[in-house]
Image: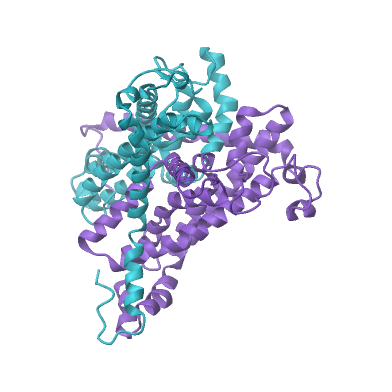
Chain colours: A cyan, B purple
Amino acid sequence: MPLVFPPARRAPRGEALVRRAFQASGFAALLAVAMVFVFLVVFTLPMFTSGGIFAVLSPVWNPVRNQFGILPMAAATFGLSLSAFALAYPLGVGVCLFLNGLGPRPAAGMLRAAVRLMTAVPTVVYGFVAAATLVPAVRGALGGSGFSWLSAMLVLTLLILPTVVLILDGQMAAVAGRTRLTATALGLGPGATLLFVVLPGCRRGLFAAAAMGFGRAAGDALIPLMLAGNAVALPRSLLDSMRPLTSHIALVAATDSTSLAYASLFACGMILFFLTAGVNLALAFVRRGAPPGEAP
Amino acid sequence: MTARPRPNRTAPGRGLERAARAAAWGCALAATLPVAFLVGYLVYEAGPALGGGLFFGDVPALPAILGQRPVWDGIWPACAGTLALVALTSALAVPLGVAGGISLSLFARGRRRRLLRLGVDVLAGIPSILMGLFGFALILFLRRTFLPQANTCLLLAAASMALLILPYVVGATAGALDALPDAMRLLGPSLGLSTWRTVAGVLLPSARRGIFGGVILAVGRACEDTAVILMTGVVVGAGLPSGLFGKFEALPFYIYYTAAQYQTPDELTRAYGAALVLLCLAVGLFLCARAGSRLLEGRYGMGEMR
């Protein structure tokens, strides 16, 4: 790509100003990230100064007695997002294989359109309809209240599936285009090419899809809020009620409470921030070595 | 396309391939059937609610829209709140996002470009609840410092939501500009046009469809996100939005709230209606964005917008 704006010898009026403005506006996103981070840090500080860092890392959340442990919520976030991810990821890879040659072409086209459309379904709609259908079904079939890890996990799977599929599908198409001739010349059929050449060649896409899918699952607040029951306890079975960090933030912020409770909220926010920022840093690292046009 | 060879029935991996094919079919069905069921169920349940009464209750449409008479048993206030929120969010995020995309695509090279790109990616990955938490912290901060009477409001919600959609607008703008052919990028400078004229007169109009598509997708996100507004001033029963510093209602929050708090079957049916309206709004915006970007395909050999 050529540099678009070579320095002009006789610059028109305001030229320098316009350029500087454009150059500065690129930093808006970076500035926003910094702002979010600084606010999180500043508001978590009371927790450190009052010696509360160990108080936060405890399993007991009881604001009445000034106990602000967020371990159960952190555990719930990891449990819920990892389990939803473990379901959605193989499903997503299967869908991508279907899209790129294992399924009949017309069906693949329809499926791709459907998956794209799934990205447009509002989270709250998933949560609302699942609360009316899935939750009673879980309650009827397996007992308990139905508002459980299991219900939230199943719906979260649907929510992150398009993320996994669209990222991986993009890279699969690129790799398939690059390797098709060679593989055909070697006598491989379309199915074998896909499984033994294209899929192993999509390492970056496989990683990117995994990272983005997991990040999405860990960051969603609405699904657990509406379906997981919101009880503060270390979840021990799939039928237990749970409260991940995201819904914890939403629930505690809604109720008026002490500033130390708020500080623990921001500690929750910090964990989420580092989790998702870490995912994106890892992605950027992977992307750097990618050949042009194949960056996931 | 190349000619396909005859399948070799004795080739190694033939059994594996057949198993993979079956698994792929299973995955395809497992991915789509639940969604089809959810949408079908929603339409079925929302059926009785559809009609003018869903929006305005017993109040005639015109006075309700103009805000002359309050609407108590309709979703119009929530719709109006969402529209106001989306308009304000776009007013904040779109100019900044487009400028950011121009900066990223046309003015940044090398290390700086990578840094800016990273900022956009990290911002896009931050969960929406953290944007809400940020807005919430901003109010706490203002209360403690120089605005003791500050409270969560429409403007705050829009500002937090703008942070959420900013990376989408930046990414779409930069992508559309990157896809322009080099000749187009050099046209302005070769004619001696100023930077402003080149950008506003040549490059932005050429890339407008891609930018438009990205903006519409971002608007769709702003319509449906609940976690941000949950923490920054949305309420139930506020009526039409009263101003920048007032509380407001919104469709997704209305749905969320009713799911947990409904008293009568009527309220539940109305929430189904609201969910269907929100779904149609989101899908409609999505299709608009796709249609816009599809017109672009093939024009400059630009790939599909993802």
**B283 or B98: nearer the viewer:** B98
In the rendered image, the vertical position of residue B37 relative to residue A150, given as above or below? below
**Residue B199 in the image: x percent, y percent?**
38, 74
Q: Quadrant of residue A209?
A: top left
What percent of the width, then of the height, locates residue B198? 37, 78
**In the rendered picture of this protein, how many numbered marks are placed on residues?**
0
Residue B26 vertical placement versus B304 (above, below): above
| Residue at the outermost top position | A143
**Quadrant containing the N terminus of chain B in the rendered view:** bottom left
In the picture shown, does residue B40 fall above or below A72? Answer: below
Q: In the displayed structure, does residue B235 sit left or right of residue B229?
A: right
- Percent x, y for residue A105? 41, 46
Tell me which residue sits at (26%, 83%) in the image: A8
Asked whether the viewer can see residue B179, the reply is: no
- The one nearer the camera, B27 or B71, is B71
State left or right for residue A63 relative to residue A290.
Answer: right
- Rendered residue at 48%/52% (across/down): B159
Q: In which quarter of the image is residue B278?
A: top right
Q: Is residue B148 left or right of residue A274?
A: right
Viewer can see residue B296: yes
Q: Is residue A247 left or right of residue A129?
A: left
* Towards the viewer: A107 or B272: B272
Percent position (x, y) of residue B61?
Answer: 78, 51
Q: Residue furthest bottom?
A: A10
**Rendering quarter of residue A99:** top left
Give above or below for A70 relative to B44.
above
